[in-house]
Image (cartoon, helix red, strand yellow):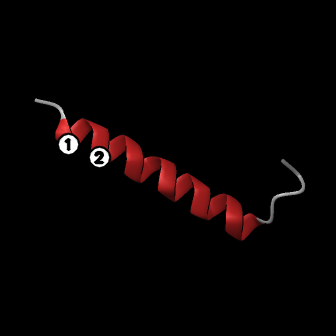
Amino acid sequence: DWLVSPKVKTDLERIKADIVAGKIKTKP
């Protein structure tokens, strides 16, 4: 984890949040 730069880590967190939000939004 310490090899990942703060910016990349932030981007990954945002992408994960988007995926989770998308899954919740597309639920019937």
From mark 1 to mark 2, how far is it between C-alphas?
Answer: 5 Å
Does residue 15 appear to the left or right of 21 in the view shown? right
- Please name the amino acid that badge 2 sits on: Gly
**Identity of the residue furthest to the top in this view:** 28
Position above or below: 27 against 12: above
**Identity of the residue furthest to the right in this view:** 3
**10 Å crowding of disc 2: few (<14), some (14-19), many (20+):** few
The residue lying at 69 percent from left, 70 percent from top is 7
Does residue 14 appear to the left or right of 4 in the view shown? left
The residue lying at 39 percent from left, 53 percent from top is 18
What x and y, as percent, mark residue 4?
A: 81, 58
The residue lying at 56 percent from left, 53 percent from top is 13
- Please name the amino acid that badge 1 sits on: Lys
Position above or below: 16 against 23: below
Tell me the residue that label 1 is attached to.
25
Q: Are marks 1 and 2 in contact (CB under 8 Å)?
A: yes
State the image quarter where residue 26 is shown. Answer: top left
What x and y, as percent, mark residue 25?
A: 20, 42
What x and y, as percent, mark residue 28?
A: 10, 29
State the image quarter where residue 11 is shown. Answer: bottom right
Q: What secondary structure is found at the residue carrying circle 2?
A: helix
Does residue 9 appear to the left or right of 14 in the view shown? right
**Identity of the residue furthest to the left in this view:** 28
Tell me the residue that label 2 is attached to.
22
